Image: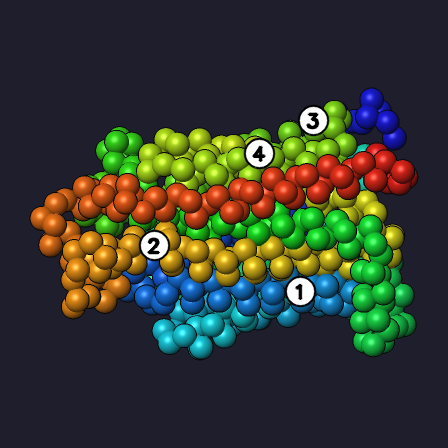
Amino acid sequence: MSKQDTPSFWGQTRGLTWPFWVANIMEMIERLAYYGVRVVIPIYIAQADEIGGLHFSQSDKGFIFLWWALTQSILPVLTGGFADRYGYKRQIVVAIILKVSGYLMMATQRTFWPFFAGCLLLAAGTAVFKPPIQGTFVKTLTDKTSGVGWGFFYMVINIGAFLGPPLAHFLYGYSWPMVFYGCALLVNLNLLWLFTYREVDSGADRSTGVWEVAVATVREILNPRLLIFILIISVFWGVFEQLWDMLPNFIVDWTDSNSLARHLPEFMLSRNLSRGPQIAQEWVINLNPFLIVLMVAPLSWYFNRVMRRLTSIFFGFIFVSLGIYVVGSSMSIYVLLAGIVCFTAGEMLCSPKMREYLAVIAPPDKKALYMGYASIPYAFGWGYGSFLGGQLYERAGEKANLALRYMSEVLKVHDLPHRSQAFARLTEILGQTPAEVTRLLWDKYDPSWVWTPFAIAGILAAVAMYIFIHFARRWQDVNA
């Protein structure tokens, strides 16, 4: 089908079936709960001065996210094949049970390893949930509805991502455990939607056993074209996930949003008023899903008409890399918001298209399996990127540690306080306001440089994608 033959936006939308919309609703509920935790958990885990937080180190946070990423993103490689073989509906039930168990453990456990186990249970539940949902999308889409269908899918994810932070901010007003209890309750709602979910035939051979499914999973991934694509995307995800993993702590530590916060309602403001009214970090980051909800479906339809999938991915990489550099380049809230806009433009260009490309090249009876493969680059990129980000931020970006460093190196203080009290102690010693001490530490140590390695990695991924496109021109599916 040529680009000129692509149906109109509303024509494509009318072609989407009921199973597609049910799967979207279930995805939205799951994402609402997931991002309700995801956007605030870096603060809960590692923010040094967070009241009621766990006060683990930034390296501990990176370690948790590393194993969270590997669990959540490697398991779908296997669970995708099992979803094709044993049925989508059955696997969704198992996923809900795992996710609820994970949220409950995270709400009740405050020591490292039990909390870590709760994170892995949540990750495992997400890994089991994704392939049958995405397999449903793939099996209900056609060549004529693929572009707008994946746009709607990404829009629905971001409706959940947009509503999750306000939900978390509201529940967090009661207590940190209430955030996790509320998300567990939300996930349970998908059990009700399962009653309206009609099983979609995957087209897979149901006579195969567990071992045959596992062997087929490994054999299929050895396709050289698939392996190279996965390696390139892995680098991108390492850059991308820092918006959720490192930026929340960076905003709380460094961003000055006082000039904008004084014009906003109370419910959007942070509880920490030491530097005057500041916008809560979850509302700042919420600009990303807000823009996506408004724009991604029509833009996906438009990009499908004017741009090849791989070309769209290439330009997306460029914008995301620039955005991730800009968000950390200044203490100004306005510069940070401009960086998020640039980042979001890139995300809309590339993220839906990466899954769509895998769906296009997948054999007809292996759609959920290939959607499982989409998680492999996410695993290595998010896992290693966040592990590295935790190390970098602890050493050169965290305000509490830089306050300790200043007291030790400049003021020659020998009786150093605990990390959770470091900034308050430095403020007291210097006799300056928190805003003045924050600016002093920024000028002295320039924590903005922690974003530079990720921006460079993103540009390198874009270069690799450009080369991949050159070789892909000889493949039949490049224009599919």
Sequence-earlier tag: 1 or 2: 1
Q: Mark 1 near mark 3, Cβ–Cβ under 8 Å?
A: no
Q: Residue at x 89, y 38 (%)?
A: 474
For label 3, count other residues whose C-alpha is less than 10 Å away and answer few (under 14), some (14-19) or many (20+).
some
Residues at marks 1 and 3, CA–CA distance in whole angstroms: 33 Å
* Amino acid bearing label 4: Phe
Extreme residue in the left direction: 431
Sequence-earlier tag: 2 or 4: 4
Residue 29 visible in the snapshot: no
**x and y, in percent, of residue 333 in the image:** 34, 35
* Amino acid bearing label 3: Tyr
Disc 4: which residue: 319
Residues at marks 1 and 2, CA–CA distance in whole angstroms: 30 Å
Please give left or right for residue 433 compared with residue 83 in the image. left
Frontmost of labels 4 and 1 is: 4
Quadrant of the drawing holding the C terminus: top right
For label 2, count other residues whose C-alpha is less than 10 Å away and answer few (under 14), some (14-19) or many (20+).
many
Sequence-earlier tag: 1 or 3: 1
Q: Mark 4 near mark 3, Cβ–Cβ under 8 Å?
A: no
* Amino acid bearing label 2: Glu
Q: Residue at x 23, y 50 (%)?
A: 272
Residues at marks 4 and 1, CA–CA distance in whole angstroms: 27 Å
Residues at marks 4 and 3, CA–CA distance in whole angstroms: 18 Å
Find residue 221 and report its image quarter: bottom right
Q: Which mark identifies residue 74?
A: 1
Q: Which mark identifies residue 302?
A: 3
Q: Which mark identifies residue 398?
A: 2
Residue 343 visible in the snapshot: yes
Please give left or right for residue 234 compared with residue 396 in the image. right
Q: Mark 1 near mark 2, Cβ–Cβ under 8 Å?
A: no
Residues at marks 2 and 3, CA–CA distance in whole angstroms: 41 Å
Q: Residue at x 56, y 59 (%)?
A: 384
